[in-house]
Image (tube, rainbow, N blue to C red):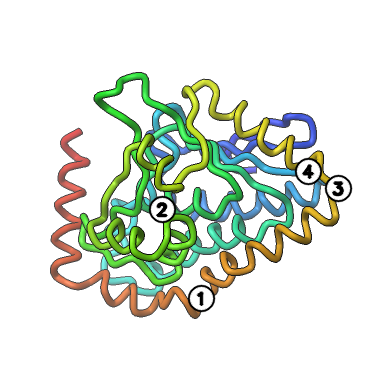
C-alpha cells in the first residue's frame, strides 16, 4: 500500500487517511493508491470506509505545480485528470458506505472527493476568525468546472445555489456549509473521525441487504454524473491551455511559492 495513505482499522470499518504533506495535493500516484485502497477494503470484507485528511487540511485538490510541470504534454495532463476522476468514481461507486471526515480546508478536488461520500463531517476551526472552508474554487484560478463535478454540487445544495457558488468559485465557511447542506455535521477537529464512525456505525445496524440496495439506487445519479461522457476531459484539457487559465494558474503557483 502507498505511503501516501495511512490505514487504521476501527473494527470492521477501515479509515483511509490521505497522507501526502503538506496539503494532501492529489497527484496520479495518490489517486491510484486511493482507488486500490478502496478496492482492497471491499475485498477484505470491510463494512464501511472513512476517508480522512490531516489536521487543518482534508485535501487542497489536484497538485497544480505537478500539472503545470507537464507543459504541453496533453496526454499526460489528461491522464492526471483522469486518475483524479477515477478516484472520485471509485468513491461514488463504492459498494459499501463511505464517510468523509473533513479535517480542515477542502477546496476544489478535496470538495469533489467529499461530495462522493455518503456523509460529510467537517471540522470547526479553533479560531472563529479563521474558519475552515469548503468549495469548488476552480474559477478563482481560471479553471472551468466540468459538468459532472457541477452535478455533485447541485445534488446537495440545489441548482440555483450551486450556480452561485460554482460561477464565483466561492469557498464556504464550515458553519455556512452546514446550513447549505454542503456538509452534514460539524465537530471539533479531534472529534471529526469519531463522529464519522458513529454515523456509519448507526447505518450499519440496519438490515444489510435492504440498506445497501436502497443506497445503490439513491446514489445512482452520483455515479452517472462522474461517467466520462459528463466530464468532457478533452474539452477540459483544451481549456487548460487558454491564456486566462494559464495566467491564473501561474499566479497561484507564485502565491504558493511565497508561503
Per the model, the C-alpha gap separating discs 2 and 4 is: 25 Å
Residues marked 2 and 3 touching at CB (< 8 Å)? no
Q: Earlier in the sequence, mark 1 or mark 2?
A: 2
- Residue for badge 4: 46
Asked if residue 187 lies left or right of residue 168, the reply is right
Quick check: can you spot residue 88?
yes
- Residue for badge 1: 228
Q: Earlier in the sequence, mark 1 or mark 3?
A: 3
Q: Earlier in the sequence, mark 4 or mark 1?
A: 4
Q: Earlier in the sequence, mark 2 or mark 3?
A: 2
Asked if residue 186 lies left or right of residue 244, the reply is right
- Residue for badge 3: 207
Q: Earlier in the sequence, mark 2 or mark 4?
A: 4
Asked if residue 88 lies left or right of residue 197, the reply is left
Per the model, the C-alpha gap separating discs 4 and 1 is: 28 Å
Q: Position of residue 114 (x, y in %)?
A: 50, 48
Residue depth check, mark 3 versus mark 4: number of the one nearer the observer: 3
- Residue for badge 2: 109
- Numbered label attached to residue 256: none
Q: Position of residue 9 (x, y in %)?
A: 72, 31
Amino acid at each position: 500500500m502507498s505511503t501516501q495513505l495511512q490505514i487504521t482499522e476501527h473494527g470492521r470499518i477501515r479509515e483511509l487517511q490521505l497522507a501526502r504533506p503538506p496539503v494532501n495535493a492529489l497527484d496520479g500516484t495518490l489517486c491510484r493508491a486511493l482507488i486500490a485502497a478502496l478496492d482492497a477494503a471491499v475485498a477484505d470484507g470491510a463494512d464501511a470506509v472513512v476517508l480522512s485528511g490531516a489536521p487543518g487540511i482534508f485535501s487542497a485538490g489536484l497538485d497544480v505545480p505537478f500539472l503545470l510541470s507537464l507543459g504541453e504534454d496533453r496526454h499526460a495532463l489528461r491522464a492526471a485528470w483522469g486518475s483524479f476522476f477515477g478516484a472520485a468514481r471509485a468513491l461514488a461507486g463504492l459498494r459499501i458506505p463511505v464517510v468523509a471526515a473533513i479535517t480542515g480546508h477542502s477546496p476544489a478536488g478535496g470538495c469533489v472527493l467529499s461530495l462522493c461520500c455518503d456523509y460529510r463531517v467537517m471540522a470547526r476551526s479553533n479560531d472563529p476568525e479563521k474558519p475552515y472552508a469548503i468549495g469548488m474554487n476552480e474559477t478563482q484560478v481560471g479553471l472551468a468546472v466540468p459538468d459532472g463535478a457541477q452535478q455533485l454540487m447541485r445534488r446537495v445544495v440545489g441548482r440555483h445555489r450551486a450556480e452561485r457558488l460554482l460561477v464565483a468559485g466561492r469557498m464556504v465557511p464550515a458553519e455556512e456549509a452546514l446550513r447549505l447542506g454542503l456538509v452534514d455535521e460539524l465537530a471539533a477537529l479531534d472529534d471529526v473521525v469519531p463522529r464519522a464512525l458513529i454515523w456509519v456505525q448507526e447505518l450499519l445496524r440496519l438490515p444489510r441487504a435492504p440498506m445497501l440496495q436502497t443506497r445503490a439506487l439513491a446514489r445512482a445519479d452520483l455515479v452517472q454524473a462522474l461517467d466520462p461522457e459528463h466530464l468532457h476531459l478533452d474539452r477540459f484539457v483544451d481549456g487548460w491551455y487558454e491564456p486566462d487559465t494559464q495566467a491564473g494558474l501561474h499566479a497561484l503557483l507564485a502565491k504558493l511559492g511565497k508561503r
